[in-house]
Amino acid sequence: MSGEGWARPAAPEWSVAGALAAAALTAVAAAGAVYAVGSYRLDDPTILPIVAAGLVAVALGLWRLEYGLALLIVLTPFAENAPIAEPENARLRVALVVWAMVLVGIQAVRSVLSGRRLEAPPVFLGALAFVGAALASVPFAEDGGAALAKFLLLAGSVFIYLLIGLFLDDWRSLKPIFAALLLVGLLVSAHALWQYATGELSRVGFISATGAVEYRIASFFSHPNQLAGFVVLFVPLSVGLYGVFESRLARAGCVLLLLLALPAAIVTYSRGVLVALVALVLVFARSKRAWPALAGAAALVVLLAPAAWQDRVADVGRLDRPEIATRLDFWDAALSMFQAHPMLGVGLNNFDVAYIDLEQTGRSFLPGSGLAPPASAHNLYLNTLAEQGLVGIAALLLLILAAGRMVLALRRSADPRIRGFGLGLLGAGIALLVSNLFDVTFVDPKTSMLAWTLLGVGAALERIDAHERALGAGSPEA
């Protein structure tokens, strides 16, 4: 055969789906091999799989930032509840904090090499004030290790906001983040309902009218209230996600998310979340288009609300009830801490230490009483006053105002997708602020990650909206 008549076979063209499938199969095979080797060669068989997973995460971040962030978002709810000051008990949690910092480093190098000019995203000043106030309170903490560990966790969450708000500036790059949020909401809500259905409950409960202890679900969280503060955000967020997805399957997932997140929030028996749900009804009732959904949600609540809820809300105004007296004890202690340290507080994550040190009568949770000192004031705003003083509460208010301004800008967008997500973000923000009147979930590592991810997405959408308006103003039709 002559050379002219011979043609080299064309190289096979790999589709994106095919490449991802091949990469997934390779990763699974590698993980299996690493696990097998680790089981026989190392005392702890989990070490090598964790290292392998870390390498995969680094590769994802180097390839596409949005996929690295999506992986981080998906893994965070499943991290251990132990503090990172105990790294042997919180390996995944430590790894996620380190991973957020690595992503920041990767993007910083990329920006320098590409000469990219960075502009402060929306809410940046509020975020800077929040981090600065948290850091300022660390040196004044009696337990410096606990304060520093808490600061690192909060900083890791803020890094996620910065990465999304600074570097994800188009719809294509935000799609993996939307998908990760939908997946996390579905997994956590479904797991919470599975626990409730199977009776796999935590050891945290309350006394019912019959004198029996009603234990509560906690899912992957340290306390039922932390789960409640996390999952309730997906009730309004499902509405925002519905508007940004185009495929019918993803939109069906958003409807399913609402149907799972709402009952999951209810069966946590969190009274703070109950008040948050009432606040959400008032917000969404302003739109007549939302009335059918609200009616359906109300029917779902009536049908699925456990009878034990009557015991949770009965006589809620009576100050002699043990749970009400406990809250008042914590709130009074928080005010006493603030009065003693008005500027910078007793130190980040040091509420329990300061509670023991208070020279004040009437405290019930002291060593020797059989009750552990409270980790927080069970009120975000009083807790901030106690741990971070006036500097901390001023920074928190600045952050809330900055986030509110951003949400209003999204709601005024000409793009219906951005307006829709802005509505979901508004609902999530209200649910977070209201529920934190009775709990401190905003600075819980898992809810903090979710909240700052949403702020990052909102910041990215505001930048996208500004870019679209600039293109529209420069077009010949404008």
Image (cartoon, rainbow, N blue to C red):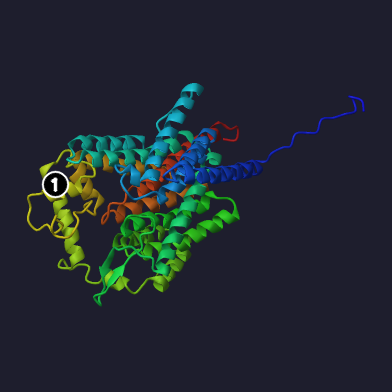
Relative image position of residue 279 (x, y in whole percent) = 34, 59
Label 1 CA crowd tier, 10 Å (few <14, some 14–19, many 20+)? many
Q: Nearer the viewer, residue 289 or 399?
A: 399
Report how many numbered discs are placed on residues in the image: 1
Give the vertical position of 221 relative to 72 (above or below): below
Residue at disc 1, secondary structure = helix
- Residue 268 visible within the image: yes
Name the residue rendered at 17%, 55% in the picture: 330
Q: Nearer the viewer, residue 445 or 419?
A: 445
- Residue 69 visible within the image: no
Q: Nearer the viewer, residue 413 or 435?
A: 435
Task: Tell which residue pokes out farthest to the right in this image.
Answer: 1
Q: Quadrant of the C terminus?
A: top right
Amino acid type shown at disc 1? Met
Where on the picture, by quarter, is residue 124? top left
Residue under label 1? 337
Q: Nearer the viewer, residue 95 or 287?
A: 95
Q: Quadrant of the N terminus?
A: top right
In the image, taking residue 400 as reference, residue 407 lies left or right, namely right
Relative image position of residue 425 (x, y in whole percent) = 41, 49
Relative image position of residue 30 (x, y in whole percent) = 56, 42
Task: Tell which residue pokes out farthest to the bottom in this image.
Answer: 210
Name the residue rendered at 58%, 32% in the picture: 475
Relative image position of residue 182 (x, y in whole percent) = 49, 52
Name the residue rendered at 34%, 74% in the picture: 307
Give the vertical position of 225 relative to 403 (above or below): below
In the image, taking residue 184 as reference, residue 226 lies left or right, namely left
Where on the picture, by quarter, is residue 366? bottom left
Task: Tell which residue pokes out farthest to the front in this image.
Answer: 40
